Amino acid sequence: MLGAKLILEILKSEGVDLVFGYPGGQIIPLFDAFHDEEDIRLVLPRHEQAGAHAADGYARVTGRPGVVIATSGPGATNLVTGIATAHMDSIPLVAITGQVPSQLIGNDAFQEVDVSGITRSISKHNFLVIKPDDLPFMLKAAFHIAKSGRPGPVVVDIPSNVQRADITAPIPDAVDLRSYQPNYDGNPRQIERIAKIINRAERPLLYIGGGVVSDSAAEELRRVVDISGIPVTSTLMGLGAFPSSHPLCLGMLGMHGTTWANRAVMECDVLIAVGARFDDRVTGDLDAFAPGATVIHIDIDPTSVSKNVRVQFPVIGSVRNILRQLTPFLEARDPAAQPLAGWMDAIGAWKRERARDIPPGLTPQRILRELSRVFAGRDPVLVTDVGQNQMWAAMYWDHAAPRRLVTSGGLGTMGFGLPAAIGAQLALPENPVVCVTGDGGLQMNIQELATVSRLGLPLKIIVLNNGFLGMVRQWQEMFWERRYSHVDLSDNPDFTRLAEAYGIRAFRIAAEADIAPVLAEAAAHPGPVLVDAAIPREANVYPIVPAGQSLNSVISMD
Ligand SMILES: Cc1ncc(C[n+]2csc(CCOP(=O)(O)OP(=O)(O)O)c2C)c(N)n1
Ligand SMILES: [Mg+2]
């Protein structure tokens, strides 16, 4: 079979029905095969980076690998930020790149770059298909590696002559890789041992991360909490895995965590990390992190154990399996009885001390609370960009379910929001998808308004417009003596007119009184909408723990 046709057959064998692709010389053979392909939809973004983020957004809300296709050279290098973003957040992605014909590789041929070399450190794995007959195995292996174990992006670089070759090797049903055998079941003795420690704990705390989401372990986590009565704090990536309205939910921890969650980390006696990796935005000063705690770490990835924080009791395997295995060994404990009652009282007191007020006026906090209210009960997806807008969205939105927050955590990629929202909306056409973005980040992939418009996607794009690269400005204000070096965006274009130029309905929020009616109207509009909200220029994200400091060194608004 022709290589290009075979690629489509393999995609179908993996259940792929949607890909994002941008054409060019060395990928024309594959695009030609798409010309009369009926079972797989190809969506054209307006920039390869956006294609990668869209595939990533699709993967985050479905749990299935996203697929992005680009040409060689500049097409491939434009994917780099998208691949790295998926890698840092363990998102399954298969990136297919065209390459110059194999006999020209290494010749500085037109539009040749060393894709394997460039993507080695930012992907889970990569393949360069030199022998046409290796194509079926390598592409199948790419899907297997992307979605198994700790998920991640895999790059398959396919020279154009391979796409044009007649390939006879069959498509393997399954791929077994001798050197890659993720371990899914936790060691039973280790699980019994951690159960004893958890049952004896007086001030236990669950610290959950993106691994609970990616392993679809929210129900198992809920059962553990119901039995054990242990409060839960979450990383940015874990939000939604445990409902934020639950009385045992303490919200996010770390740099922009709640004061009470961070205090609980500092004072707990047993910290149970589940699918989380002790990122520096979470731990702050490593020497001062959870100083009195015995640390248990449940994770699929053995290389993440004791990488940053010394872990006394690691259990390696699927988070979902391990939580299931753990449940029968847990003693039922009532959070209203001692010793948990004392612990919950202390946390409750810290919470009352610092209850999170919603500042009055046309504030980002108010907008997020209202947005959350407008879409509550409709299984909405919140997609964010990066910066202050991301943190306000994370803090003030009601996270009700897993796979419903799409945000660039590990890499913090500005420009992620709009294209990722496109991928999420295509994956979930019936769900409301809300994209909260900054004025800076929007302009990093603003060309995707054309994709939104062509597809008629009913996205609700909310621009928290402060006329600043706000998060950097906040750091300059707080830590660099207000020296606002090159963060002013007050001469932004009029985003409502820009949206209208793309054929997208636009609204403005210019006063506090506009918030509720405009958001209601935006929500009711059946097509794409952009809302430009003029928030205070120098609003700050609080609380904040300065980078590298202990979680006790929090700066709050008051
Ligand atoms: C691609 C990229 N470049 C630079 C940064 C550094 N950075 C982080 S937040 C931020 C400001 C974002 O401004 P805006 O999009 O307006 O959002 P705001 O913080 O104002 O809500 C910058 C420049 C980044 N995260 N990503
Ligand atoms: Mg801004």
Image: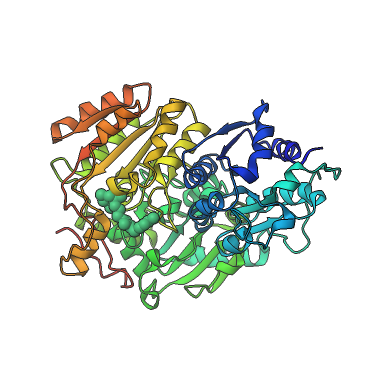
Tell me: 374 left or right of 30.
left
Identified at 73% across, 51% down, the residue is 141
Residue 177 place in picture, x, y as percent: 77, 58
Q: Is residue 388 visible?
A: no
Tell me: 379 left or right of 122.
left
Identified at 55% across, 57% down, the residue is 330
Using the image, determine if residue 20 lies above or below residue 228. Answer: above
Tell me: 103 left or right of 545.
right
Residue 60 place in picture, x, y as percent: 51, 44
Quarter containing the N terminus: top right
Viewer-nearest residue: 420 or 518: 420
Viewer-nearest residue: 2 or 84: 2
> Quadrant location of residue 335?
bottom left
Quarter containing the C terminus: bottom left
Residue 454 place in picture, x, y as percent: 45, 27
Q: Is residue 75 visible?
A: yes
Colouring method of the image: rainbow
Viewer-nearest residue: 202 or 494: 494
Residue 32 place in picture, x, y as percent: 67, 33
Viewer-nearest residue: 90 or 17: 17
Using the image, determine if residue 525 lies above or below residue 204. Answer: above
> Quadrant location of residue 207?
bottom left
Tell me: 98 left or right of 368.
right
Identified at 17% across, 30% down, the residue is 514
Identified at 26% across, 62% down, the residue is 544
| Figure quarter occupied by ligand 1 | bottom left
Total marks shown come to: 0
> Quadrant location of residue 384?
top left
